[in-house]
Amino acid sequence: MTSIYIGNLAFGAREEDLRASFEKFGEVASVRIAANRITGRALGFAFLEMPDGDAARRATKQLHNTEVSGRPIRVSEARPSDRVIRI
């Protein structure tokens, strides 16, 4: 599973918009648009997972700087988080 970071996302972008753009390259397992926990307002970035690593790399390369929902998106492979989650 390859995780992809999508930045500079329009606040009005929907999961369906991202899924439609990335499904041209292969199966999309999940889409998560980051939102403020209190207000629910989008934060301008998202994470998307694709099971096929080759398809994910093609999508990352070809969709970087393309327009989705009226804004040019920034696409890259997601880096692992170094945040500590406290329970």
Image: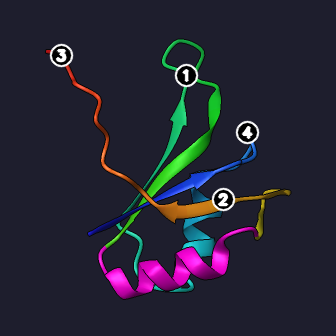
Q: In the rendered image of this protein, does residue 68 appear above or below residue 43?
A: below
Q: How crowded is mark 4: few (under 14 residues within 10 Å), some or many (20 or more)?
A: some
Real-space Cα separation, disc 2 to disc 4, in angstroms? 14 Å
First-in-chain label (1 vs 2): 1
Q: Residue at x 52, y 63 (%)?
A: 76
Residue ID for mark 3: 86
Is the N terminus in the top left, top right, bottom left or bottom right quadrant?
bottom left
Where is residue 83 drawn, in percent x and y?
Answer: 29, 29
Q: Which mark is residue 36?
A: 1
Where is residue 28 drawn, in percent x and y?
Answer: 41, 71
Amino acid at the residue labelled 1: Asn
Where is residue 40 drawn, in percent x and y?
Answer: 57, 23
Amino acid at the residue labelled 2: Arg
Q: Residue at x 43, y 85 (%)?
A: 55
Residue ID for mark 2: 74
Q: How crowded is mark 2: few (under 14 residues within 10 Å), some or many (20 or more)?
A: some
